[in-house]
Amino acid sequence: MPHSLRTHGVLLRRLIDHLDGAVEQSYALAGLDYRPRFTPILRALLNSGPATLRALSDRTGVTHSAISQTVAQMGKRGWISVQTGRDGRERIVGLTPFAMQRLPALERCWAATEAASASLDDDIGQPLAEVLGRALEALDRRPFADRLAAAAHNPGDNP
């Protein structure tokens, strides 16, 4: 592929397709109706117990909107239950017995995913999670929109 077509967005989408597609297939092979995007929520609930959507967003670093959408998907598949909070507006998310029964199979899938990730890290010579983490930290310090604006204003002179 010519370098000019290898934009960050294209490369990241391809990376996500490779990773999530293979992980999702491993869940299906294990007999689980489960998606990779469920994992941050499920792990947060395992670690800290039932939580509001806002608390799950804070614990996982996933947007409130994405948490809400994922919780709806997880509920339809039986992984979580949602109860109304004390004030009637809050929604409290918790794991179901269905989820707890499938936890050993999920943990086997997660262990395989970690081993496969370590293999990828070895092949690329550095931990992919660290590279992505550094990129996100750099974007937190200076968002890409700011970088685009500076590049548009002064092409070729962008520190």
Image: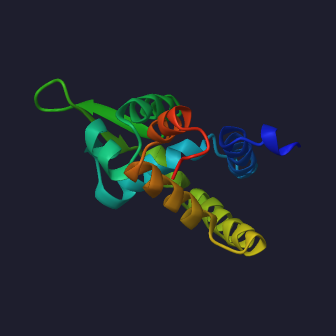
The answer to which image quadrant residue 88 occupies is top left
Q: Residue at x 78, y 71 (%)?
A: 123
Colour option used: rainbow
Single out the residue that lies furthest toward the top: 88
Q: How many marks?
A: 0
Quadrant the N terminus occupies: top right
Q: Residue 21, how many percent across, how many down? A: 73, 44
Q: Residue at x 61, y 58 (%)?
A: 105
Q: Left of 152 or right of it: where is 15? A: right
Q: Residue 47, how many percent across, how many down? A: 35, 60
Q: Nearer the viewer, residue 22 or 47?
A: 22
Q: Residue 17, how many percent across, how many down? A: 72, 42
Q: Nearer the viewer, residue 97 or 124?
A: 124
Q: Nearer the viewer, residue 106 or 116?
A: 116
Q: Residue 156, how many percent across, how many down? A: 61, 44
Single out the residue that lies furthest toward the left: 87
Figure check: 127 above or below 48: below
Q: Left of 4 or right of it: where is 59? A: left
Q: Residue at x 29, y 57 (%)?
A: 48
Q: Residue at x 59, y 38 (%)?
A: 155
